[in-house]
Every structure is written in structure tokens, then in C-alpha cells.
Image (tube, rainbow, N blue to C red):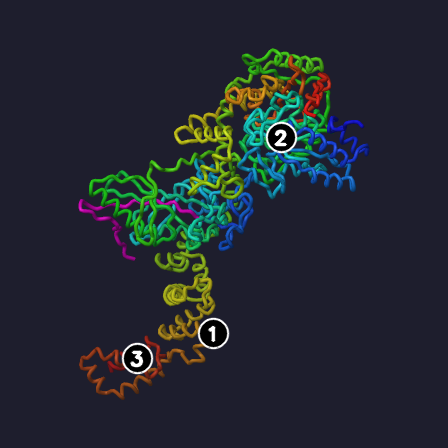
Amino acid sequence: MSKEKFDYFIKGDKGKYEVVIGLEVHAQVLSKSKLFSGSSTKFGADPNNQVSLIDSAFPGMLPVINEECIKQAVRTGLGLNAKINNYSVFDRKNYFYADLPQGYQISQYKHPIVGEGKVLLDMPYGSKEIGIERLHLEQDAGKSIHDMDPTNTYVDLNRSGIALMEIVSKPDLRSPDEVNAYIKKLRSIMRYLGTCDGNMQEGSLRADVNVSVRKEGDKNFGTRCEIKNVNSIKFMQMAIEYEATRQVELIENGKEIDQETRLFDTKKNETRSMRSKEDAHDYRYFPDPDLLPLKLEQKLIDELKKSLPELPDKKKERFMKEYGLNAYEANVLVSEKEISDYYEEVAKLSDKKLAATWMMGDLFAMLNDKGLDISKSPISTKHFAELVQSIKSGEISGRIAKEVFEIMLETGDNPKKIIESKGLKQQSDPKELEKMINEILSKNKDKVDQYKSGKDKLFGFFVGQVMKSSGGKANPQLTNEILKKLLKG
Amino acid sequence: MVDITNQSLNDIIENIKTKKISSTDLTKAYINNIQSAKKLNAFVTTTFDHALDKAKQFDNKPNFDQLLPGIPLAVKDLFCTENIKTTAGSNILNNFIPSYESTVTKNLWNNGSFLLGKLNCDEFAMGSSNETSYYGNVINPVGDQLVPGGSSGGSSSALAADLTPATIGTDTGGSIRQPASFTGTVGLKPTYGLCSRWGIVAFASSLDQAGPMTKTIKDCAIMLESMSGFDEKDSTSINKKKEQYSKNLKDNIKGLKIGIPKEYRVDNMPKEIDELWEKGKKILKDLGAQLIDISLPHTKYALPTYYIVAPAEASSNLARYDGVRYGYRSKQGKDLIEMYEKTRSEGFGDEVKRRILIGTYVLSSGYYDAYYLKAQKVRQLIKKDFDDSFTKIDAILTPSTPSSAFKIGEKTNDPVSMYLNDIFTVPVNLAGIPALSLPAGVDKQGYPLGLQLIGKALDEQKILNIGYAIEKNCRFKNKIKRWWL
């Protein structure tokens, strides 16, 4: 694969600017119950139907750590090649808001459960390592609904207390494309691990985006702005573009950049100041006295490590080695666990390379078209493998295969049956083909003469005639060979 | 007819078991006392109908194997009680009716007792005289001008005035032991984690502990046995086997080593306190215990440490009282911020506001290290003082308070002098260890004075035994005349 060069800079009048990005991703932990209570975490329940006395902070209620959430955080940490801290502390982050029942959020401040790690990105210009600063566990807040009533705000506490993992990257990202790759990679790792469903529409994955700019080649970071709570990759990319351009304009005009928190307005496609550094909350963090420090036994960490599934990076390597795929193909096929599972089942029953090509071509196009996940594919791995094998063995041509594929979609029948019943089998008997071609040539003597006198282009005409009279079933390779031989003579 | 209400809990239980009195008659006797003691203002809520129902149920189908068979009990209004108003002495919870029962009270009910009413206390347990309650100050039955101590002032007053056979309080910095000392009763603050905090309105989570308040040491053992125990709903609860404190109560203390800390002899301490302490030492020595002089060098830092840690936690614990979901909400307020401000201004009293401000301050960025973090370090040193001492001794003997009960209003305008009242009790909370106060004498005005026994973590049995021995030998008798009748 040809290697492109990294080229994302904001061009100003006075030079090129590099964009420096760090992300704080909030990923909802996949667990049946909340971080400190037994309430359900299921999405979409009626407002305030999944709220315990603890989530709504009644007097005398106490948090008790949900062990599964801890394990999920450790698994995620291991998936990010990160250091798992045997000792971590839950702190209270104090602030007042109507949808924050306790008046504080239980989070981790000085002693997070997971320390430094790294994530590998495959970019067109090569692979790039993004550092992870930390991962910590915290409670989600509830939801304030301002538009249901003209004078009142309604509060839904279903989300209140749900476990989130905040994954903080180092300021290693340099472009919206890298952000896209990074979020997708994180999401893929967590979905492989089963620790977060990565569903951005339901808010299971959101991010605060830190953006700064600096002149190309500068060693020091510029002043950063934090764009709060962006909930889609597209919006993150738009916000970064806007924000980086805004900062470059300020610098070029000799103005200072204020370190501040900004909001991205998705309708106007711009970021707006939310609060400046001076107005920053003083969260008055301190260790939550209702919870003892969390001490993880190495044995538990080791056990979790042993039980981890094969993750995308490892699987990619294996796909390249085992199935002879190139890096691009392997990358695409490991991006989702379900895709890789589908591929491996097909590859077991058919040609590995051809299976990859056909999956990434027609199958993906069809799924995309229908808006389906691969797990909902109307074509089973077994049928798909049969189709691939039919192409491989020369039973049908690629062109006919597309036709068969369409019929498979409509009828759900297996390809063998379709090929037989519709008589789509490729004509691959050289004698039969030669007989047919001879007939065609003798009917078009004038064209044969023209060809022989140098009109090479007419070769296509003969192929067309063969396909026409065979109903598209003539083996194209064989047809070529025979035609060439006969036209020479 | 004999007045059963001035008997000890243990004697009452005997009378119930031997069917000398029914639970219903017992309950009626207390209701009668309560109704004629309104002047003391010990109760915020009474639950007479509930109590009589439960008493009747017990009498119809008595179970004498329980620890508290058919016993009516009033409890501090800091314990959440299912379907019964729970105020924590505050206006902000004036209309709050929990849908749940605290673990500690549930334990008591599971042992055969039932609720007689909810007892007044300092607002959110912040106070040493029961003068910060929204429901008015409580009067000490010892004298009509005296405070009953705090924050469990309603508890100590009701107990000393025979309005409940025993009771429970909470102790964050002395809130059980000091009122016990002021009223001539016994009060125990257990090891942190022995009694569940689930369902108790929180003041300072790392210090709060529920404990019994009783007339005798034996009663104290019975109550502690009934209320304590592991609770998986409280992450700081200690998971250990339940002890049979009352069955194992022994007054033989021969050979025990009792530490006498020199730091507890403070300046300007009344002579009577010193004399009481000497009296306690003499009793112990006469009973064959060995007195050992010890030093707890960081004691002087305990009070300042406490008044950083406790308000810091309180400022956060009380943030939930915001008018959004339950409790008082101001009708004023144009927006969310104004609603918060008005609700909390109108809902909280001065002492609570003072501590929220102190707590918010010491946790603020720029001050955290100098105050909160340093206080936590000192707290470790205070704990280490005790740990070191307990390698050489079995228990520590000190006075419970630096004075007897003071007059209502005497200290209300001087918070620091009020805070100084907790000087002997606070170190124990910071160390998380158990201590009990038992009445051992009176001052020249005849007001009760208490001695404090401090044990190492989970050594409740030992300090109860030592207290049992002192109790038998000092023959203290509370001489409360029912002047309020």
C-alpha cells in the first residue's frame, strides 16, 4: 500500500499551524446495575423508573461498589495495554446541579483505577501510537429536561449513578482523521472486551475535546480550550476544525487565547465560550468517606487478563499471517468483532483471500445499503462461503456471482440451488466453447478479416458475441484463450 | 403500684419475661411519663398508637427469647424510620417521611422492641447542648436551667427522665458520651464500623457511629448486642461474628492495665473533674487493676483536626438538601440558583451554616493541602498514639467532659467554648476506637459527672467489663426529682 504523508495543518498568513488534540472519552460501562446501587442501567425506560434511594440521594443512603463495574474497568485498562493500579480511591467532586442528587459526583481524582497505556492507530501514513494518560470510574449524573414545560425544568434520574469510564488520552492526536481513528479504535477494543457498547446515539460514548494549536515545529504547546460533551465523531471533527481555525485567527491577529471551556453548537457549526478559567468550578475534591480505598488483588487482575478475548491488534496480525490478507483488508475485517467472526467462519469454508474481497465488496455494500449490522446479515456465513467457492472453482463468473448474490438476498436460498435451477453454471468445457466460438467466427467473417488486418479493438466484439450467445455463462478466461488461438489461425 | 419506668432495662426485661408486667402496661406507663414531661421538649414525634399496637401484638404472642422482648424505645431523630417523620432536628427535613428503616433501628425491632417516638437532637447532630435544634432546646431533667448535652440531648434527657427504658444516639465527636455524662447515664460510642450507618442522616461519615444510651452498663451491653452487626449496605461496616456482650459481662478486672494519659489534665479544669478521675483510678486500683501513666502526645491537635474533618465531610454530606427531591423548598426563587440559596438559607440553622462554610473553605482549592490534607495526617498521628499505647495497656481512663452540664444559653454565643466541651471525646472518634461514659459522681451542685473508658478497636467487651466493675463500686445514684410534673 502506498504511504501518504501526514498533512493536516491550519494555514495562516504567517505559516502553518499544527493542531494538538487530547480527548477525555466518557464510556458507559456495560453492566446490569449502576456503579453504587442495584438499579438497572437499561436504556430507554420511562423517566425516573430506574432510580433507587441511593441514586436519588435520600438521607442516610450509602454507596456500595458494584464489583462488575470494577472488573469492566480493569478489563478495559488491560485492553488499552495500561497499568492497573492495585490501589485506587473514590473521591467526591462537589457541585450543585438539579440533576446531581448528592450534590457531588463520586469519581476518582488522584488515584485512578487505571494508569498509563497506549492505543495503536493505523493511519494512511503508517501506524501511530496514542498515549493513554489514565482511566477512572465515575458516576453519571441525571438529565435535566428544559423544554417540556414553559416554566419548570424536569429531572430524569435514570442515568444518575450509572458507571462511566473516563479515558483520558495524552495530547497525541494531530488531526480530525486521527480523532476518528482513535474513537473507532477505542470503541472497537471496548466492544471486543464487552465493556462498553459504544453506542453514541444512546450516549454510551461521548467526549470532551481539548484543542490547541502551535506553529509547525514548535516544541511548546499552545493554550488549550476544552469543548465539552460532544457525542458524535462527525461533531468532534467539525468542532476541532472550527476551534483550531478560530485559535489560529486569534494568534495571527496578535490576540491571546483564553483557557476556557466551550460548547459546540451543532446547528451553527461553531464553538462558544461556556465558562472561562476564572469561572471554573472549584470541585473541592476529597476522598469519599463512605467508601474504603479500592484494593485490587493481583490475582484478580491476572485472572481477568487470562480471560481477555483476542483484541483487534492481535487479530489483525493473525489474519495477515494465517489468511494472507494485506494490512488494509485485515484492518477492515477486525474493526468489529462480529465482522471478524463472520469472516473467520466464511474463511474456514472457502478461499480466504477471495472471501475477504467479496465480504468487503458486495456484502458490506449490501449491509450498508440496508443499514444492517453484520450480525443481522440476511446471508449466512455458510451460503456466503458456498458462493465464494463457486467463484473460486470457476463454476460461476464474478459477474454471474453478483446475480446469484441478489437472488440469495431475495429468496434466502443457497447459491448451489440458485445456480442449478437458473442454469447459471459457467460454460467451462473447452470443446463446447470452441464449437460455439467457431460458429460465431464463421458468421462474422468480415469482422475476422478486419481483425486480422490489424483492427485489434474488434476482440471485444467477439467476446461480447460469445457472452451473448452463452447467456453470460461462458468462462471469460477460457473464452479469451480460445478466441485468441482461433483468431491467430 | 411500683413505678416500673425508673428501673433498668435489664430489670424491665426480667419483669416482662416473668410476666409481672405486660408490654402494653409498660408502654402505657412510658406514654404517661412522656405526656407529662412536655416541658423537657425531648420528643419531636411520638408514635403512641404504633407502640400500643406493637405492644398488644407482643402480649398476644410473646417471644421471650428475644433480647428486647416487648420493649418500647424512643430513638434519636437522626435514624430514618419507615413511614415516620425523620427531621434530624432541622427545618429542611421538617416534612420528610422516609420510606425505609435504618439498619440499626431495624435490628432493634428485630430483637423484639418497637418505636415509642423520635427524640430531639441538635440540627444534623451539630452541637453539644441541643440548642441548635429547629424544634427548640431540650431541658436536662437534672435541672430546669441545664442543657442535656448534645447532640443526642433528647436521648439523654428522655432516658434520665424515665421517658424511655433505653435509647440510641449517634456520636461524631462525643454526641453520645457528653450528654450521657451531663445526665448521669451510660453512653457508648462503638468502634467505627460496628453499627451500620445505613439509614442514619449523615453528619461526618468517617466519624459518625450509632451507639446505646442506657441507665446501666448491663443495659448498655444488651442494647449494643441488639443494634450492632455487619451490614453489606454500608461499605465501612466491619464483617465479624456477633458478640454476646451482656452474657459475657464480668466485673473481674484484676490484672488489667489501665492507661492514664497525662494530656487529659487540661488547664482550668474544675477541681471536681480531677477528683472524679482520682476516684475512678482508686476504684480500679482497689479492684486489682494496674494504673500506668501514658502519653498521647497529639491529643492537643485533636479538636482543631476534628473541626476541619467533620465540617469538610458535612459540607458535602449536606449538599443533597437542595429542595429538589424532598424536604423543605423555598417558595421564593426565580431560578435554580436562587431556589438553592433561599431553600438552604431558610432550611438550615446558624450552626449548620457555620459548619458548611468552614467545611467548604477547608476543601477549597488552595486551602485543601493546608487544612484538610494536614488534618488527615494529624488524624493518623492521633490514631497512632492510641495504637502505640494499646500495645502496653488494656484500656484508658479519662474524665468524659471538662465540666458538668452548663446552663442553657451559656455558650450559644461562643462557639469555640462550646467546641471545647468535646475535648476529651473527640480523639476517640478520630481514631475510630470505642469509648464509653459512665456516671461516677457529682459536682458540688449535685450535677452528674462521667468517667470515660477508651478501648482498642473492637474491645467493647473489655471496656464494658471495666465499666461494670466501676459501676458496682462507685454506687452512683441519679437523684432526679420529677420537677416537671
Q: Can I make out residue B191 in this image?
A: yes
Label drawn at residue B169: 2
Quadrant assignment, res B88: top right
Residue at mark 2 to residue at mark 1: CA–CA distance: 76 Å
Magenta span of residues? A1-27
Please name the amino acid that badge 3 sits on. Ile
* Dominant SS type (magenta): strand
Closer-to-camera residue (A422/A445): A422
Residue at mark 3 to residue at mark 2: CA–CA distance: 103 Å
Image quadrant holding the C terminus of chain A, namely: bottom left
In which chain is the residue bearing label 1?
A
Q: Nearer the observer, disc 1 or disc 3? A: 1
Closer-to-camera residue (B428/A122): B428
Image location (x, y in percent) of residue B72:
71, 35
Please name the amino acid that badge 2 sits on. Gly
Q: Which residue is identified by label 1?
A: A413
Do the residues under discs 2 and 1 have CB atoms within 8 angstroms? no
Mark 1 vs mark 3: tell me if same chain: yes
* The magenta stretch spans residue B359: no
Label 3's element?
helix
What residue is at 50 percent from the left and 39 percent from the top? B320
Label 2's element?
strand
Do the residues under discs 1 and 3 have CB atoms within 8 angstroms? no
Closer-to-camera residue (A458/A117): A117
Mark 3 vs mark 2: tell me if same chain: no
In which chain is the residue bearing label 3?
A
Q: Which residue is identified by label 3?
A: A482
Image location (x, y in percent) of residue B175:
59, 26
